[in-house]
Amino acid sequence: MQKHRRGALPLFAILSLLALPAAADIPAAKKPMPLPLPDLAPTIKCPGTATAGQELGSDIAVWVENKSGVPAGQFALDLVLSHDAVVPVDYALYSSAYQEDVLLQGGREFVSSLAAGAKASVTLNGNNRIPEDTPAGDYYLAAVVDPGRSVREGNEENNVALCRIRITRPVVPDLQIVGFAHTGSPTGAPPECRLLVTVVNRGPAAIPRGSGGRVDVFVNGTRVDSVDLDGTQVEQSGFHDVHFAYDPADPDRSRSVISTRYLFPPSPTSTTYRCTGVADPANLIVELNEANNSLTRSEVIPAH
């Protein structure tokens, strides 16, 4: 009987190994091809200059191109004001006061779809208003496409387009109510305690005379007086007059005190009243900031 040596392979096993293909002859497994995706890219044109508080409306023009061979579904487009060229691809927040990367008022639009390879103009329906308190300076106006990331794209790095815009401050008045006071308790029968209101113009331009501007005065929610800014109830002198433009070297120059017709009722004890002043309630005077014209404050009136 023939014996095999320890460790030797049988002949049939050696022949099987010789029949195996070389590693180079084995085809490599193919990687799956990535699915094609849309690719949205905006373009924007805007005015070179604008005034704080200005409504740009359709003075802005925006286009969006789908650079892919795949159509895109609905997406949003935000119009954002930024001090620098770094604008996040997120839904911008609207604020009536300026903040970095602020959404313009009415500055969000929605596009229902965009065909493969198409470039379309975006209809701007909003007023696209710049916040009134935006400081003067150089800014970027950005068109941010698909800020909500609702469309999965092949390239997510080209969703922001920029244009340069210089913001200036308008040369107009800016009325503000800054405080309340009372005349005290002069001697008399009965002693008089009259409500006083202080108004100031903090804008770079004078208030035109004959404007029709008024100051409405409320006590505990009831209107007690409406004072013509040109009338005799407003303290006007060569030193202080709300009609003057604001002067940083003499900040009190454009301040006036209004002596209202309202008398606090006599009381043996001190009483708290809620006083409100509203400058130019009918918006007859064009102002730098129309959102700072009122002041409400509790006033403690002493016994009188």
Image: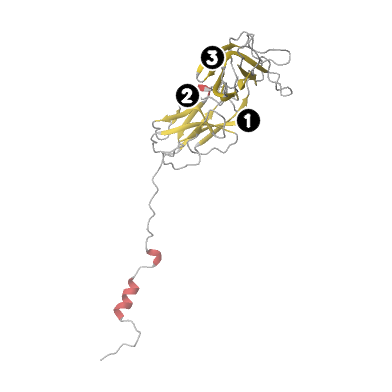
- Badge 1 amino acid: Asp
Q: How are the colours assigned in the image?
A: secondary structure
Residue 124: image x %, image y %?
47, 25
Disc 3 to disc 2, C-alpha distance: 39 Å
Q: Are the residues at dot 2 and dot 1 in contact (C-beta closer than 8 Å)?
A: no
Q: Residue furthest bottom?
A: 1
Q: Name the residue that disc number 3 marks.
A: 224
Dot 2: what SS? Answer: loop
Residue 149: image x %, image y %?
44, 39
**N-terminal label among 3 and 2:** 2
Q: Name the residue that disc number 1 marks.
A: 138
- Badge 3 amino acid: Val
Q: Are the residues at dot 3 and dot 1 in contact (C-beta closer than 8 Å)?
A: no
Residue 228: image x %, image y %?
59, 10
Q: Name the residue that disc number 2 marks.
A: 126
Q: Is residue 19 above or below residue 254?
A: below
Dot 1: what SS? Answer: strand
Disc 2 to disc 1, C-alpha distance: 23 Å
**N-terminal label among 3 and 1:** 1
When asked about the image quadrant of residue 265, the answer is top right
- Badge 2 amino acid: Gly
Determine the residue positioned at 30% across, 80% down: 11
Give the label on residue 277, or none. Answer: none
Residue 214 visible within the image: no
Mark 3 closeness class: few <14, some 14–19, many ≥20 residues within 10 Å: some
